Amino acid sequence: MRIIEDPRSYALLMAILASFLTPFVASSINVALPSLGSELGMDPFILSLVPTIYLFAVAVLLIPMGRLADIYGRRRIFQFGIILFTVSSVFAGFSISAEMLLFFRIIQGVGVL
């Protein structure tokens, strides 16, 4: 049994939660940058790519992902994106190198669309 029975209210709640992810993930990483830099031995330039590469992936793929949603359906692409974002967030949290972290930040950017 769902807490929210009305499908429109449920869809609205999911849209609100998903739209919260983009600015939260984009800005929350900034708090961890000093720790990430020292833990992974990243120089300042590579460290600056951590938040930037995520936003770059979002900006570049916004229109193509919209087209994919038109072709395959918004719901299917939305669900795929949430799963992709969640999995990439877990792997990004366990990154052991700067390259691995940057790769999963790109995948996060793809998944948040």
Image (spheres, helix red, strand yellow):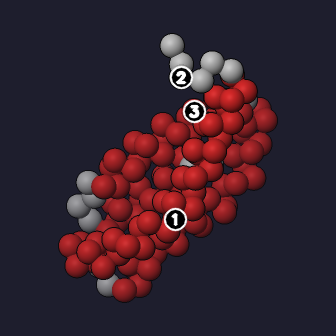
Residue 51, x across and y down, in percent? 48, 70
Lateral position of residue 63 relative to residue 89, left or right? right
Density class for disc 1 (Cα within 10 Å; few <14, some 14-19, many ≥20) is some
Looking at the image, tell me whether mark 3 or mark 1 is earlier in sequence order.
Answer: 1
The residues tagged by marks 3 and 1 sit, at their Cα atoms, a distance apart of: 20 Å
Establish if 89 lies above or below 11.
below
Q: Is residue 45 visible?
A: yes
Residue 48, by quadrant, is bottom left
Describe the element under mark 3 as helix, strand or loop.
Answer: helix
Whole-percent x, y for residue 101 in the image: 35, 62
Name the disc covering residue 73, or none.
none
The reply to whether residue 110 is in sight is no
Type of amino acid at the residue the image marks with label 3: Gln
- Gap in angstroms between the C-alphas marked 2 and 1: 30 Å
The picture places residue 34, in percent across and down from the top left corner, at: 30, 79
Tell me which numbered mark, 2 or 1, is placed earlier along the sequence.
2
Q: Residue at x 62, y 50 (%)?
A: 19
Q: Label 1 sits on what residue type?
A: Ala
Q: How many marks?
A: 3
Q: List the residue tagged with mark 1.
A: 26
Task: Name the residue at 32% across, 84% down.
Answer: 43
SS of the residue under disc 2? loop
Q: Give the numbered dot on residue 3.
A: 2
Q: Helix, strand, or loop for circle 1?
A: helix
Tag in front: 2 or 1: 2
Q: Which mark is residue 79?
A: 3
| Residue positioned 38% across, 73% down in the render | 31
Task: State whether residue 83 is above or below residue 23.
Answer: above
Residue at (22% x, 79% y) in the render = 38
Between the C-alphas of marks 2 and 3, the distance is 19 Å
Amino acid type assigned to the residue bearing label 2 in the image: Ile
